Amino acid sequence: MAFTGAESPDAMTNRWIRGIVGCFAALHVALTPSSAGAAPASRLEFNRDVRPILAEHCLNCHGFDDKTRKGGLRLDLREDALKGGKSGKASLVPSRPQDSELVHRLTTSDPDDLMPPAKTGKPLTVSQIETLKRWVAEGAEYQPHWAFIPPREPALPTPRQTGWARSPLDLFVLARLESEGLKPRPEADRTTLIRRASLDLTGLPPTPAEIDAFLSDSTDTAYEKVVDRLLASAQYGERMAVDWMDAARYADTHGYHIDSARDMSAWRDGVIRAFNQNQPYDQFTVEQLAGDLLPGATVDQKVASGFNRNHMINYEGGAIAEEYHTAYIVDRINTTATVWLGLTVACAQCHDHKYDPVTTRDYYSLYAIFNGVPENGLDGRHGNAVPTVSLPSPAQDAERLRLNAAVKTAETRLAQILPSVDAAQAEWESAPLPEPADKAKAVPEAIQKLRAVPPPSRTTAQMAEIQKYYREEVSPEMRRLRDELKVARKAKEDAEKAIPTSMVMAEMAQPRDTFVLVRGQYDKKGDKVGRALPAALPGLPDGEQANRLGLARWLVSPGHPLTARVTVNRFWQMYFGNGLVKSAENFGTQGDLPTHPELMDWLAVRFIRSGWDVKAFHKMVLMSATYRQDSRAPKELYAQDPENRLLGRGPRVRLQAEFLRDLALSVSGLLDPRVGGAAVFPYQPAGLWEELMSRQDNDAFTAQKYVASRGADLYRRTMYTFIKRTSPHPSLSNFDAPDRQVCSVRRPRTNTPLQALALMNDPTYVEAARHLGLRALQAAPDDPGRIAWAFRQAVGRRPSAAEIDVLVRLLGDQRRTFDRDPDAARRLLAVGDSASTVANPSEAAAWAVVAAALLNLDETLTKG
Amino acid sequence: MNSHQEIQRLLTRRHFFGRMSAGIGGAALASVMNPGLLAGSAAGGPAGALHFPPKVKRVIWLFMSGGPSHIDLFDYKPQLRNHHGEQLPASIRMGQRLTGMTSGQSSFPCVAPMANWRQHGQSGLWMSELLPNMGRVADDLCVIKSMWTEAINHDPAVTFIQTGHQQAGRPALGAWLSYGIGSENQQLPGFVVMISQGSGNKTDQPLSTRYWGSGFLPGEHQGVRFRSQGDPVLFLGNPPGMDPASRRRMLDATGALNSMAADSFGDPEINARIAQYEMAYRMQTSVPELSDLSGESPATLEAYGVRDGATDGGFARNCLLARRMVERGVRFVQLFHRGWDQHGDLPKQIRGQCQDVDRPSAALIEDLKQRGLLEDTLVVWGGEFGRTVYSQGALTQDNHGRDHHGRCYTVLLAGAGVKAGFTFGATDDYCYNIVENPVHVHDLNATLLHLMGLDHTRLTFKFQGRQFRLTDIHGELVRPILA
């Protein structure tokens, strides 16, 4: 791997810097990032040491938002702070804390003058005050917020320990560890490595055969081959899609009120494909945000643009359309800003952002960019909401053509027959009316009177009236042809309805006007605004317009300070449990600082320079020594760095919701590996939906009653489970999967007794244990061998003798239990839909309990 | 410290019901490593210690889902009878927005309160005869007649009162309490939700799990649904054919293997997992014991109206369960009783709804009082909004409906921390606008938190770079109602 040196920033980067520096008026600023690898600098650093204090305790009243600014004082800009507020006293006098009003106000004994005011409930600690004093004494230098400075490739650190690093990224990690007096852990054993890599890249455990192949591969590239194989597997795209579905708030229902079904599976499958084909992330971004606006957009590109139609959609009776249309656009802005900018712009919906450079006007200028979709405020009652794109199969396409032609034919025949019908009408008029058998069917009096009027004497209206009556009520030919047309049209409509659609973005020819909404309220319109990007951020790339396409291309322009950082941080989070910036959703001034700022920049630059090559990025990280470390560590290390922020050991985190169930299905042999398609309905306790849904409307809407799938669909990967937003599947919600109501780029990881209950008693896991037990029975001739086989399925490694002992004892106890009560064994073996032929139920049931014990091991549930 | 000792410590932790392996977990982990931290935090959840001594230790919120008519039940305006059938004056409506269900109506005839009304108790509280039993506890009630909300539709209105925001994504009050105070009982969750089906409107408004969701708080704070069908708590029961002894043996084996792993890996999370499995095992006993009403006296069952074939959709049983939960230290029990959405057929439907809830609601308050629990338990009775004074659809002799109305409605409180036999706030002659002491949903939530020892401006959680709180940037403590 080439260790490339720093390269000079390109023109784009220069433009960014000008814009950013202009925005913050941050003069006299050292742009050089701190050296994370070196021992802690003796000088304080604004971004690391001072800004967090100001942001948390001061900027709410002395920040960017001029409407809430107190005393005319602004502390986010050095120039303003030097001038001071209305009092005329300089808040900061560089190098002279004793003359700085800021220091005085932090330390005064006069409660009226003391800052922050007691009522804010945010007093400074003694050490925070000392930090600020020292910072003033050191010259009160500011820095622009780190994340707004475009990443530049830092020089590689030179840690003392040699021979450990496998990738440049390891040098950053190692240098930081050394600065803390720590050492990295040695490389994990191969079984651990392949299990970790498999779970990270596919969400599935390795099979024992795959493990054995790796263990017996003595070539230098054995591990690399594993990584390459995993990246090339179809399951890689599924695994990547899961996190993207969280970000995109993907679901199978609309989310409000009745919460009936939608179908965005085509969008989801497109995401899986894009990852599997390793579509460069910049192209992927453009298609997700604005695929519909690409010249000659393909159907797939239009489908991809549905990213920003995945938000909740309402049709509650009585709701006000404009209120919800506003909510959709707000959701799009917040989601887009979170996913690509790592910024929380939602504050600016009501007021200028207090901490980050986003004004209300900026917010509504972005709003205008998303306000041109030909959509309805209330929609979705009957499935997907417009605009949609139709996705017929070839057969459906042919059928549609055929039925269109049939309708045309019927229409033509109806038109052609009119002259002969008119002639028949004349005959009918001249003949006497027969006596009707049913009085109700008698010719109405008005028509009878008209018949009496000789045609030449009739008015135009009268002629039309009698003709209409004859054609609709009398003429048998007309009736027949009309019925034919009706049938043809119905057939066409039904066929159209059967064609799947996907919700997409589109642009109205004439976009709606956009106004600033006062305090964010949909019905309080302020100034009219046009489309624009936040004024404080640098402008669009040359030749781009301020529309969605321009926005998307701007996000992935090479000098953009945020997109690449935010993206690689999410990838990092996928492997290590936390991003380098822990607040993956917020890189603004209120967000967490990166633990390894230079590594973050190095990774971002690397990613951009690779052509936004996602698979290459994964491979780079997975090949690193940092990733390959053993997660076994002395307890003191776990205590010292419980979240492994310093990366001094391998990652060890519980599997996310989907992959827990996938693992159980996989090791039991039940998993149906089909990729993509319609959502499925695995087991769910009866009544969970129905209790919450409207009783009488149950049959009038979709997704009100839960009907479990049958057969193979019960065993699909969990990412295909139908997601009903108002009642998420317990196997997801119990294990911290977001309910997909809003964008989510970081999942919590809890550990609760409800999880334990689910893993022990949910029929999914009981059924999986049943099958894993049966497979074990057939896998080896003796009990210890069978136990070892099943243990490897669940955990990867071979069990120790002590571990086998524990399970052999359990097996023996359960054999005796079920021998005494074979009926209990049969009942246990009847859990789940899948049949299994069992010669000895007591034996099979005992093995099911042993398998259940294995499926509930911490090590099984954890990527270690 | 060996694994076993650590597990024992986890098993006796106050904030037991769940833990995070990240974020708050850092602090929680510190408490695992340092038992002194635990001993020091006599009260308080993961958010830290309480802000002040609580008046209320537990809350039972009888949530009347759909929006009961304050006009027909609590906010007595006899003079409205003089305006029955008259158009709602523009001076009252003042151009306020209406839902799409009635905004197109050409006529807005006022509807007088139905049924007869009676005064009750020392306080002389007027209440509809449709609620005879609740009248009996009038002197325990603190009646807020001036509740209001901006929302005019169910989904945003319930989301608002539950989470402080009309759009999805934020934690519910109960989740905030779990985060702020933690659980009092190591074997039961701190926030429980129960649902019953009203006999009024059967096209009842759907509920959403987000009404008791944890939003951006860790998932362990979400409300746990206690259900009347199947396992009371999801997956509580062992699978068919697996007896408790087998389960215990399986757990012993898993625990033994996990302990070995804990020693080998050094990761304290493994011990936490062992502890959660043990907790799950204990719940398999404690929850059925909680749900088992066979120990309740016939008199108690009769007082609540719990009996076979009861037609109240399960509300009575849920009320009795709520008492059993607060007895066992569950912090926040929320009952959702559905069917209060009387757009049409109000005269018939509201009778059914009142029959569902009248007796159990009164019995609950009396039962809590008799057991001394009302001294530190607060009962809340109310929904997401009220209903319009004008008829939705035609007003006929025997039928009419009322649309949603957020400008004012009534909520009842009873128990710890609030004045008894007290009425707060007033509406105009049409029950349409508040004329005195408005109480916004944020104000109510701020007050509930206060009563439980939490300052609503200080109970915060940092998410997306902002300190979020239940009351957003609003909410005033309603001091005049405090005892």
Image (cartoon, coloured by chain):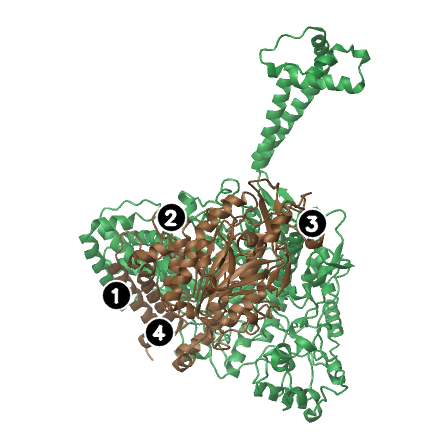
Chain colours: A green, B brown
Residue tagged 1: A806
Report the front residue among A563 and B144.
Answer: B144
Chain where mark 2 sits:
B
In primary-sequence order, the first of circles 1 and 3 is 3
Say if labels 2 and 1 share a chain: no
Report the front residue among A655 and A414.
Answer: A414
Asked whether residue A313 is in view, the answer is no
Q: How far apart are labels 1 and 3 at the CA level?
A: 63 Å
For disc 4, the neighbor class at 10 Å (few under 14, some 14 to 19, many from 20) is few
Q: Is residue A53 above or below residue A268?
A: below
Disc ID at residue A373? 3
| Quarter occupied by the N terminus of chain B | bottom left
Say if labels 2 and 3 share a chain: no
Q: Quadrant of residue B345?
A: top right
Residue tagged 2: B310
Say if labels 4 and 3 share a chain: no
Describe the element under mark 3 as helix, strand or loop. loop
* Nearer to us: label 1 or label 3: 3
Chain where mark 3 sits:
A
Say if labels 1 and 3 share a chain: yes
